[in-house]
Amino acid sequence: GAVVSQHPSRVICKSGTSVKIECRSLDFQATTMFWYRQFPKQSLMLMATSNEGSKATYEQGVEKDKFLINHASLTLSTLTVTSAHPEDSSFYICSAATGTGYNQPQHFGDGTRLSIL
Amino acid sequence: KNEVEQSPQNLTAQEGEFITINCSYSVGISALHWLQQHPGGGIVSLFMLSSGKKKHGRLIATINIQEKHSSLHITASHPRDSAVYICAVNDYKLSFGAGTTVTVRA
């Protein structure tokens, strides 16, 4: 149980393109979803927290107009990297939790490796 | 900000050996997670604990809240245990350690 599906697993695209990444909870309702970014050889960094039906909360230094997050249903959250540039190349991973707050298990997707040429 | 430190950074073991990974943090927390990240990047949550000890198969996680320290043990290690193990702590958000790269040789 508690499966999170993330799609696509890998994206290679040209600079200036917008890229959408989907995160789905397959067998549970995810009240809260988290988006993380991981650079090579570094640990995960929280980008934003989204609760179903409300605006995402972004961490300091993360541009909300650059990284658009939508959590329209209890099973789907999307991250759109708008007008992507090479410096946006990274590994993006989502996680989902059944309640609000951080004091509960998070279930992670397999991640999306984004490469901007 | 919670400073999370893991040790060792890298670890190589022979199959069958007992492995210990340590995690310390600077600020009191409500819970601590141990995560496993495989070479492809996918992450599996191994444990979430707030006190004492948990066991799942060959994996054991312990936490000492007073000392702000947790350990992850792998008994009878196997090459399939090769992965990056990450400690993450809950205060107002998850703060992650840098990870421990474990390689188990057959």
Image (cartoon, coloured by chain):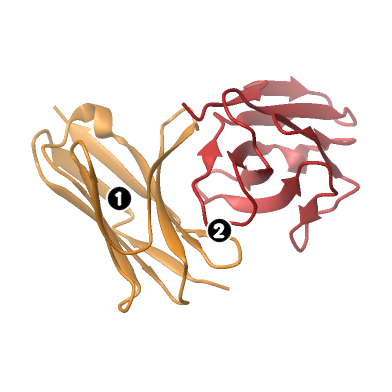
Q: Earlier in the sequence, mark 1 or mark 2?
A: 1
Which of the chains is red? A
Residue type (three-letter) at the residue carrying disc 2? Leu
Crowdedness near tag 2: few (<14), some (14–19) or many (≥20) residues, C-alpha within 10 Å = many
Residues tagged 1 and 2 counted as in contact (Cβ below 8 A): no
Residue plotted at (64% across, 33% down): A29
Q: Secondary structure at mark 2?
A: strand
Position of B8 with respect to A104 (left or right) is left
Q: Chain of mark 2?
A: B
Between circles 1 and 2, the one closer to the viewer is 2
Residue B32 higher or lower than A34, as above or below: below
Position of A7 with respect to B91 (left or right) is right
Could you tell me residue A100's position as x and y percent?
A: 65, 52
How many labels, in total? Answer: 2
Position of A108 with respect to B97 (left or right) is right
* Front residue (pair A108, B16): A108
* Front residue (pair A74, B16): A74
Position of A86 with respect to B31 (left or right) is right
Residue A55 higher or lower than B82, as above or below: below
Residue A50 seen by the camera = yes
Residue A92 higher or lower than A65, as above or below: above
Which of the chains is orange? B
According to the image, label 1 marks what residue?
A: B10
Residue plotted at (80% across, 27% down): A20
User: Tag on residue B94?
Assistant: 2
Rounded to the nearest whole Å, what is the CA distance between mark 1 and mark 2? 22 Å
* Front residue (pair A69, B38): A69
Quadrant for the C terminus of chain A, please: top right
Q: Chain of mark 1?
A: B
Could you tell me residue A48's position as x and y percent?
A: 73, 51
Could you tell me residue B50's position as x and y percent?
A: 38, 62
